Image (tube, helix red, strand yellow):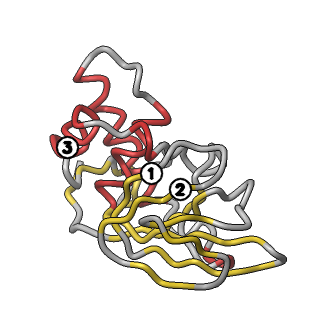
Amino acid sequence: MMMLAAALVTVRLFWLHPPVSVRVNGKEYHTAARLDGDLKLEVAGTPPLAIHGPLDIATRDGHLLLTLHMPREEYVAGVLGGESSVFKSEEALAAMAVAARTYAVKHAGRHAAEGFDFCDTTHCQDLRLAAMSERLRAAAESTDSEVLWYEGRPADT
């Protein structure tokens, strides 16, 4: 196992079902914008998300494309929310954090042609920002920057 420096990842939120409008910190958006800082993101039919931007909002074919820039470790905690939030063992959760991080390092830029690293679905890793908890953040933090390597490259976990 080798350690990596901190990094940012870009994630397309609502990739499969992009909204036509969003509310951020109480303000309705229908057009392109770049928002930063602590944000409360509301999309019809989903629980509100407390996120920290930058959040880029772009438009395409009457829909909004939401791209969140986030620290890789926060992304790992969000992936744990989707992939393993029901794990009982702290050790299993920590192992999954290493696997999720390794996947993120190995497949960074998976959606580069579309302008982001990962989507929020199981196509990449099941990112559930609304499910993040202190327990999941602690699991990501306890393995901060740990990545599995195989033959000199990040393993395909």
Instruction: Point out residue 38 in the picture as x, y percentages from the top left corner.
Output: 30, 66
Q: CA distance from mark 3 to mark 1?
A: 25 Å
Question: Badge 2: how crowded within 10 Å, few (<14), some, or many (20+)?
Answer: some
Give the amino acid at mark 1.
Leu
Q: Callout 3, which amino acid?
A: Thr
Could you say where residue 147 lies in the image, as x and y percent from the top left?
30, 51
Image position, residue 108 (x, y; %): 49, 66
Residue 11 higher or lower than 78, as above or below: below
Give the number of marks: 3
Q: Residue at x 47, y 69 (%)?
A: 10
Q: Which mark sits nearer the N-terminus, 3 or 1?
A: 1
Q: Which one is closest to the eye, mark 1 or mark 2?
A: 2
- The local secondary structure at tag 2 comes to strand
From the viewer's perspective, is residue 5 above or below residue 155?
below
Q: Which mark is residue 49?
A: 1
Q: Amino acid at mark 2?
A: Glu
> Whole-percent x and y of residue 30?
67, 76
- SS class, disc 1: strand
Q: Secondary structure at mark 3?
A: loop
Which residue position is annotated with label 2?
42
Sequence-earlier tag: 2 or 3: 2
Q: Are marks 1 and 2 in contact (CB under 8 Å)?
A: yes
| In the image: residue 144, left or right of residue 67 | left
Instruction: Depth check: give the residue in front, 50 or 129.
Output: 50
Q: Earlier in the sequence, mark 1 or mark 2?
A: 2
Front-most of residues 38 and 69: 38
Q: Which mark is in front, 2 or 3?
A: 2
Residue occupied by mark 3: 143
